[in-house]
Image (cartoon, coloured by chain):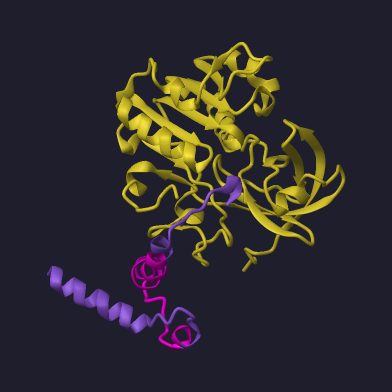
Chain colours: A yellow, B purple
Amino acid sequence: MENPYYPIKSVIKDVIEETPTIKTLVIKPEKPMPFKAGQFMQLTVPGIGEAPFTPSSSSSRPELIDITILKTGRLTNYSHEVKKGDTVGLRGGFGEGYPLKELEGKEVLVVGGGVGLAPLRALLYYLFDNTDKLKRISIKYGARTPEELCYRREYDEWRKIDKTDLTVTIDKEHPDWDGRVGLVTTLLDDLDINLGNSIAVSCGPEIMLKFVSSKLESVGYKPEQIYLSMNRRMSCGIGKCGRCNIGSYLLCVDGPDMNYAKVKDIPGLFG
Amino acid sequence: MAGGGNARPLMENRFTNRFMCKFNWGVKIFGEVACKGCGRCIDACMGNIDIRAVMKGVAKDVQLVK
């Protein structure tokens, strides 16, 4: 049997600087690593350790994987120092990923915050490939400042795609910004979506998920229609260690994208 | 957790997680109790928490509810 803990040797093909604190590593694994949108992978930085990240590239090209990393801790600091040509390890994809079957024929509302757009980008690429099966794709995205907007270079492209709309907001007024100002939840006040036939998918900091989920409930979404990307520090990826439990659910097996109805009553869900 | 989050910020969250993980969720996920009964946690506990006493207390409360 193949050892699930054995990382596949991979080479950094490119490093893209998204924002001052966010970098995208373009990684070429030694052998193709198929994954579903929303599934996560364990990235090994040699000598440092491994941490879970969700690929932000399209699952239809598993030979080149984009991983977007926010500089926030020990391993992410080191992963910001890797250069083109360096070797890292990858193992995955683990988890259920996004409920792609359920999205068919629906109006999909995608709510992202900060670097939370990274896993959603994998979903968006899947949705863009399958626009004929969907009613609509509505993207709401918020970040702290204009510099911290992730994938800013791609927004115009996304807006041009059939049935797609994108609204971007930043938290506070900024001299270089003439768009909307306010937290991402303010974008949910004036939704023109047929709520009965819609699914909302959200990813971002836990505190944002907390307010987004309660906001979505208050505008009329049922908990079953809300999916939250609860990406925590998954460790083994195969449901053995119990590091990532939320109640009796293990995020690495049942998630990382959980139906809000399943987890909403668990005490201390958002910390 | 990244972004400064803490999945279980309160002591009661962590305490509950320990016992629920061993005796409730462990049974649900793996089909068996996740405590072997070796007793090392009782010896090692600096807070003097006896897992047997906690479970007896829980059992008593469960009976009271019934």
Quadrant in which the N terminus of chain A appears? bottom right
- Residue lying at 32% horizontally and 43% vertically, measured from the top left: A261
Residue A118 placement, left or right of A85: left
Let me know if residue A129 appears in the view: no
- Residue lying at 62% horizontally and 63% vertically, measured from the top left: A4
Residue B51 placement, left or right of A114: left
Residue A217 in percent (x, y) is at: 32, 32
**Of A230 and A59, the residue lying toward us:** A230
Residue A17 in percent (x, y) is at: 77, 33
A42 up-or-down from A140: above or below: below
Q: Which residue lies furthest to the front in this view?
A: B47
Residue A214 in percent (x, y) is at: 36, 35
Let me know if residue A132 appears in the view: yes
Residue A251 in percent (x, y) is at: 48, 53
Magenta segment: does it hold B40?
A: yes
- Residue lying at 31% horizontally and 29% vertically, measured from the top left: A218
Q: Give the range drawn in magenta.
A: B15-42
A259 up-or-down from B59: above or below: above
**Of A90 and A212, the residue lying toward us:** A212
Q: Quadrant of residue A54 in the image?
A: top right
